[in-house]
């Protein structure tokens, strides 16, 4: 019986080691719950990593910095994908009296990313990178574009034929039910098989950005819809009478 007991002990040890290794891998992949933030930040400098000059800013007004930091406190832990999607990349440097904290920001708003508009990254003392997600409103503030009282409500619409997606951004929080109804009530299509209609889902990364993903478009099909009926949470309209068809979306099936 002793040899059998010895084998049982070896098996138990091997299982224990395997479970320990699995837990270690899971812990390494788990997102960090809290984004590290400096106290008493005095300035925030934004530099483009992609080489674009537009949108660069330096924040020194304490009211703006306070709003920016509050948004970071509310950031949601995320993962770093393989490969990680890439948008417009920015380096953000925050300074206090004695310390400097640097972040990398990945602006995915104009990409076809379904559930994420903005990601922010830091590295810990071991060189391990960690990620969090933030809303569109936060990066507008970061880039000095959040003067809502000086801007009229506007929608920015683009199409990605590779993923059969329409990407919509706004400078106001949108009423989601008005988006759903506007698409359903104005959707038109061509080139579909007999008795077939476009199938789609609406994905929101935050209240200022959504993606409409179509799942059954073919090379000969096309869809279009109108978003004039979309409303902001402030009850404002996104219709600009001087720019006709500004809120019109058209998407061709992938060739």
Image (cartoon, grey):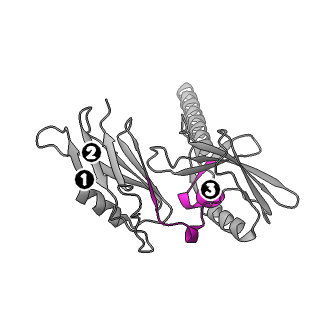
Q: Residue at x 31, y 38 (%)?
A: 252
Q: Which residue is mark 2?
A: 223
Query: Residue 16 appears at what percent x and percent y?
Result: 58, 38
Whether residue 146 appears in magenta in the rendering, the answer is yes
Q: Is residue 178 visible?
A: yes
State the image quarter where residue 8 is shown.
Answer: top right
Whether residue 43 appears in magenta in the rendering, the answer is no
Query: Residue 33 appears at what percent x and percent y?
Result: 62, 56
Q: CA distance from mark 3 to mark 1?
A: 41 Å
Is 203 placed left or right of 134 in the picture?
Answer: left
Q: Tell me which label, 1 or 2, sits earlier in the chain.
A: 1
Q: Which residue is mark 1?
A: 187
Q: Secondary structure at mark 2?
A: strand
Q: Residue at x 50, y 50 (%)?
A: 116
Part of the protein shown in magenta? 131-156
**CB of mark 1 within 8 Å of CB of mark 2?**
yes
Q: Tell me which label, 3 or 1, sits earlier in the chain.
A: 3
* Most foreground residue, 251 or 178: 251
* Residue 78 sits above or below residue 142 on the image: above
Identify the residue at the far right of this view.
98
Which image quarter holds the C terminus? top left
Identify the residue at the far front of this view.
242
Q: Secondary structure at mark 1?
A: loop
Q: Secondary structure at mark 3?
A: loop
Q: Residue at x 64, y 46 (%)?
A: 130
Is 6 placed left or right of 179 in the picture?
Answer: right
State the image quarter where residue 144 is shown.
Answer: bottom right
Q: Residue at x 59, y 58 (%)?
A: 140
């Amino acid at each position: 019986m002793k040899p059998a007991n010895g084998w049982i002990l070896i098996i138990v040890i091997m299982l224990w080691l395997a479970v320990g290794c699995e837990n270690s891998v899971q812990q390494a992949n788990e997102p960090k719950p809290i984004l590290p933030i400096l106290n008493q930040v005095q300035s925030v400098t934004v530099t483009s990593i992609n080489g674009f000059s537009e949108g660069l800013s330096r924040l020194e007004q304490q009211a703006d910095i306070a709003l920016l930091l509050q948004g970071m406190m509310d950031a949601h832990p995320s993962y770093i994908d393989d490969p990680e999607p890439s948008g417009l990349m920015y380096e953000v440097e925050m300074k206090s009296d004695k310390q400097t904290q640097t972040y990398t920001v990945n602006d995915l708003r104009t990409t076809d990313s379904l559930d994420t508009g903005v990601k922010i990254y830091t590295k810990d003392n071991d060189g391990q990178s960690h990620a969090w997600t933030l809303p569109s409103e936060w990066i507008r503030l970061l880039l000095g574009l959040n003067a809502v009282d000086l801007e009229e409500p506007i929608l920015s619409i683009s199409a990605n034929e590779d993923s059969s997606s329409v990407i919509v951004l706004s400078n106001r929080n949108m009423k989601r039910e008005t988006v759903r109804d506007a698409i359903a009530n104005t959707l038109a299509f061509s080139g579909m098989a007999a008795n077939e209609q476009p199938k789609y889902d609406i994905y929101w990364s935050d209240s200022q950005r959504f993606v409409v993903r179509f799942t059954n478009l073919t090379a000969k099909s096309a869809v279009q819809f109108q978003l004039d009926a979309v409303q902001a949470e402030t009850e404002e309209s996104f219709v600009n009478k001087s720019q006709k068809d500004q809120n019109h979306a058209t998407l061709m099936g992938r060739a």
